[in-house]
Image: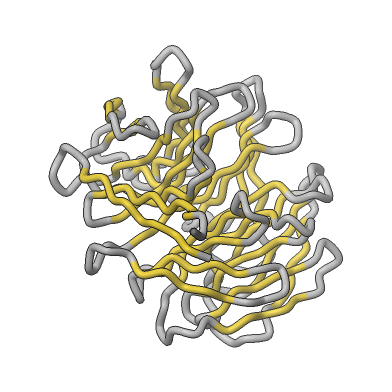
Amino acid sequence: MNVKIKEYELPHADSGPYGITSGRDGALWFTQHKTNRIGRMTIKGKVEHFNIPTINAGALSIISTTQGDIWFTENKANKIGKLTITGEIMEYVLPNPDSAPFGITEGHHGDIWFTEMNGNRIGRILPSGETIEYDLPHPASYPSFIVAGSDHALWFTLNQSNQIGRITLEGEVTTYQLPTAQAGPVGITNGPDEALWFVEINGNKIGRITTSGVINEYAIPTPNARPHAIVTGPDGALWFTEWGSNQIGRITVNGKITEYPIPTKNAEPHGIAVGSDHALWFAEECNKLGRLSFVQNP
């Protein structure tokens, strides 16, 4: 497969782009944890910014909901932020201090689910604005990314206890131990095969877990690739960022992996999303957004 990678320099120096999502408006929305802003970029490269009310909020993960709102975690401020379609930012203070919210996703009924790294909990904001929290069974498991599964449950990575977690809408938690020791799972997404696919930042592997708990792992060809985030691409494969090896990776549902180098050295790619233009967009800590598009063979 032939691909082309184009990079867009952001206007504010050292803004620290991290999470990225595709909005209902067709634009890319991303967090900038160093300048304390939410950014919006059109697929043509036009950028605008929205200031987060809380100083040094530490905005990291970000999603766009079916309603068109943008939600994000404020890791340092202990809040969940919501940017409405009218441009207003609302913030929800979490019940327990220093919870360090990190991953975030939309649930099956429009509620917002998120992980609390320090709190060792899974949180949930109902449409009414009420927050519910669920304690995890293993101490200091460090829940990271979270996604709504095809089985009407939420699935998440437990970075330090080396597990994949599942929580039902009633709050029942099940965990699955990874075969590779100290694999350090981080990003997780729904695959085109209805399984959950995730990355192992320390194990240097891509993992797959079925909704019944069967796990397979696939070794990344490049040593110390440090995979971080993962998403299902428009081509029916899974795409992931490798901030250790400065590449974008692709894995088919059969486990075949291909890697593509990013032009800028030490770009530190993190979040990745599919844009309205059917390209892969990713956030680079080096103050850029990257776009990977497919090139037709001559």
Compare residues 112 and 9 and report the one nearer the observer: 9
Give the percent coordinates (x, y) of residue 295.
47, 55
Give the percent coordinates (x, y) of residue 286.
22, 56
Give the percent coordinates (x, y) of residue 224.
40, 83
Does residue 119 sit above or below 162 in this rendering? above
Please name the residue shown 44% across and 63% down the image: 241
The answer to whether 108 appears left or right of 296 in the picture is right
Compare residues 264 and 175 and report the one nearer the observer: 264
| Residue 99 seen | no
Please name the residue shown 29% across and 42% down the image: 32
Give the percent coordinates (x, y) of residue 197.
66, 64
> Number of labelled discs?
0
| Residue 199 seen | yes
Please name the residue shown 67% across and 56% down the image: 236
The answer to whether 29 appears left or right of 142 in the picture is left
The answer to whether 55 appears left or right of 250 in the picture is left
Query: Given the current orientation, which residue lies at the most extreme left position?
Result: 13
Query: Given the current orientation, which residue lies at the most extreme top position?
Result: 86
Does residue 204 sit above or below 18 in this rendering? below
Please name the residue shown 28% across and 29% down the image: 46
Q: Residue 135's image quarter? A: bottom right
Q: Residue 225's image quarter? A: bottom left
Does residue 228 sit above or below 89 in this rendering? below
Query: Given the current orientation, which residue lies at the most extreme right position?
Result: 212
Q: How is the image coloured?
A: secondary structure
Compare residues 142 and 27 and report the one nearer the observer: 27
Compare residues 159 and 254 and report the one nearer the observer: 254
